């Protein structure tokens, strides 16, 4: 680290911006910005000037002159460190997003309660910025594009963000080396939700491949790994790169030979049915496969309805009619519209009077669109004490209720559990939405005891959502097996805020496949009559 004019200017510039974000006196914040500008333009190195000369420079003065001396002597500025310590790292990172200044970041943090770049991107995708002063449609779009550009240059990537690129590169490689064997393997073949690199194995000449890849135009920054193998061990290489270490070690203890011509024959040698790459994570799948045939897992074509969606009534981009028409066009049998509840002011949540108006529109659309059905729902905020944010009289007007946490996400496990368990025990809660509130690569989610939550959902006949938005995929697929063992139902829901958002169902299905979810145990795979029966039976059992 070189403590020169530029370094000191950066310290003052950051200090001014952080003070602005914290709402400090504008005169003070401006003085640091002016000092930064002055230092950047200063022709002589500041450390070579005597203290009295420094303080006499226009734009510096005594107070800032002392702080310059502090930086020169210690390498840091205590005041700046205090502001950094009191500002979430994600908020500081927002300063690198083109189009966002301190004032807008202050609104994002203090009013929207957003503390990371990933959360901000999600808010842009849900049109939430438009609800706040100073954020127009163009600003929101610019912020979204700037964030997406930044995220593309990180070390980890969402499966959904690299999928099309992976398939494009795969096609180019196979076209360039048509006589060689190729396989796109690794994390991508396993359908992991987070990808660190794209991995191929090939029998092509590796030097020629490297030259081709180096010359290839890179549309994405995700790292590419290509390993050379031979035709004789191609299948073995494919298997070894297509499973977890736990799975591999457990399977290889059971096989009778290490010479196999296909992955199918490898499993046959262990007296097991073929297990696809997306299920090769946990060793327990081998025990299950040995004791009974594995049931066919859910496919995207098994989804019969859109459950959990938002319209223009809250923070969606499409009208109810447009959301329903898109469902019908795609062959879905029904739509569960679940706009945000009244506490979600940041998402234009519906107060009681607007609910009545929305329900009237749904009734009219149902008359027009029969036999297609729009079900009346709400994504009700789980309040700090675990209560839902409507009275029972209002909750009783919905066909079903999705209960979700959206605020005060920084909770201890004890607080989170108390809050969630009370909501689960509410007889009107039909579905528990995005269980941990996580945003992949952006927010870890609040800590919970998954087993206790799942046990409570099973006991109270509450469906557990697998939120299919590729940035959520919550609940985590690693807990679905336990939920199925306890008799709980899962619901793969897109949390769609546009009609285009319906396509996210696919990413929920890919995650659910890893856990072996079947259509019979997924609520959004129920046909219309079975769904109606489910709702009626549940209300009857709850006495509501």
Image (cartoon, rainbow, N blue to C red):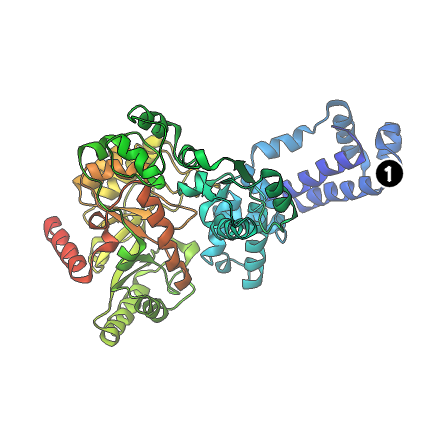
The one of 105 and 258 positioned closer to us in this rendering? 258
Relative horizontal placement of residue 24, taking residue 416 as reference (left or right): right
Which of the 4 quarters of the picture holds residue 45? top right
Q: Position of residue 367 (x, y in %)?
A: 22, 75
Relative horizontal placement of residue 39, taking residue 223 as reference (left or right): right
The residue at the far bottom in this view is: 368
Q: Position of residue 174 (x, y in %)?
A: 51, 50
Relative horizontal placement of residue 30, taking residue 156 as reference (left or right): right
Q: Residues within 10 Å of mark 1 (few under 14, many from 20)?
A: some
- Up-down relation of residue 107 to residue 425 (above or below): below
Q: State how many labels appear.
A: 1
Q: Position of residue 488 (x, y in %)?
A: 20, 42
Per the image, the residue denoted by label 1 is 57
Tell me if I can see residue 111 in this picture: no
Which of the 4 quarters of the picture holds residue 155? top right
Q: Secondary structure at mark 1?
A: loop
- Up-down relation of residue 269 to residue 163 (above or below): above
Looking at the rendered image, the quarter that the N terminus falls into is top right
The one of 315 and 524 positioned closer to us in this rendering? 524
Residue at horizontal 81%, vertical 41%?
A: 40
Residue at horizontal 77%, vertical 23%?
A: 73
Tell me if I can see residue 109 in this picture: yes
Which of the 4 quarters of the picture holds residue 477? top left
Relative horizontal placement of residue 440, taking residue 278 as reference (left or right): right
The one of 278 and 515 positioned closer to us in this rendering? 278
């Amino acid at each position: 680290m070189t403590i020169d004019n530029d370094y000191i200017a950066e310290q003052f510039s950051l200090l001014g911006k952080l003070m602005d974000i914290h709402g400090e006196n504008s005169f003070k914040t401006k003085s640091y910005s002016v000092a930064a500008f002055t230092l950047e333009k200063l022709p002589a190195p500041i450390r070579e000037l005597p203290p009295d000369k420094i303080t006499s420079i226009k734009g510096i003065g005594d107070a800032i002159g002392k702080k310059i001396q502090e930086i020169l002597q210690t390498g840091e500025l205590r005041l700046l460190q205090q502001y950094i310590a009191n500002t979430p790292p994600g908020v500081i990172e927002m300063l690198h997003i083109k189009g966002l200044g301190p004032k807008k970041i202050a609104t994002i943090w203090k009013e929207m309660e957003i503390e990371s770049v990933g959360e901000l991107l999600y808010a842009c995708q849900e049109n939430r910025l438009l609800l706040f002063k100073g954020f127009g449609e163009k600003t929101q779009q610019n912020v979204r594009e700037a964030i997406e550009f930044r995220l593309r240059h990180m070390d980890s990537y969402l499966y959904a963000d690299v999928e099309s690129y992976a398939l494009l590169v795969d096609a180019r490689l196979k076209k360039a080396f048509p006589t060689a064997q190729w396989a796109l393997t690794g994390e991508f073949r396993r359908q992991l939700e987070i990808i660190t690199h794209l991995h191929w194995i090939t029998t092509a000449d590796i030097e020629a491949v490297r030259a081709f890849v180096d010359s290839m135009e890179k549309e994405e920054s995700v790292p590419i790994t290509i390993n050379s193998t031979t035709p004789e061990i191609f299948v073995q290489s494919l298997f070894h790169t297509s499973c977890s270490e736990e799975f591999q070690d457990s399977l290889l203890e059971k096989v009778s030979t290490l010479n196999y011509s296909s992955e199918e024959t490898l499993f046959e040698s262990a007296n097991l049915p073929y297990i696809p790459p997306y299920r090769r994570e946990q060793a327990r799948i081998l025990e299950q496969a040995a004791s009974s045939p594995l049931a066919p897992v859910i496919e995207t074509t098994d989804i019969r309805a859109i459950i959990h969606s938002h319209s223009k009534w809250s923070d969606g981009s499409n009208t109810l009619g447009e959301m329903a028409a898109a469902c019908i066009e795609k062959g879905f049998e029904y739509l569960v519209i679940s706009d945000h509840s009244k506490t979600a002011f940041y998402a234009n949540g519906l107060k009681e009077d607007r609910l009545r108006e929305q329900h009237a529109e749904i009734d009219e659309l149902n008359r027009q669109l029969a036999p297609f059905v729009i079900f009346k729902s709400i994504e009700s905020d789980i309040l700090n004490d675990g209560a839902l944010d409507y009275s029972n009289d209002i909750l009783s007007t919905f066909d079903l209720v999705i209960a979700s946490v959206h605020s005060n996400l920084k909770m201890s496990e004890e607080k989170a559990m108390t809050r969630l368990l009370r909501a689960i025990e509410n007889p009107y809660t039909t579905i528990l939405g995005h269980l941990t509130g996580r945003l992949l690569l952006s927010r870890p989610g609040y800590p919970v005891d998954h087993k206790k939550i799942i046990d409570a959902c099973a006991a109270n006949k509450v469906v557990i959502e697998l939120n299919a938005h590729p940035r959520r995929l919550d609940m985590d697929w690693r807990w679905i097996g336990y939920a199925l063992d306890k008799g709980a139902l899962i619901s793969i829901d897109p949390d769609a805020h546009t009609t285009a958002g319906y396509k996210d169902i696919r990413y929920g299905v890919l995650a659910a496949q890893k856990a072996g979810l079947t259509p019979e145990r997924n609520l959004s795979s129920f046909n219309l009559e079975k769904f109606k029966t489910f709702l009626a039976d549940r209300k009857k059992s709850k006495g509501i």
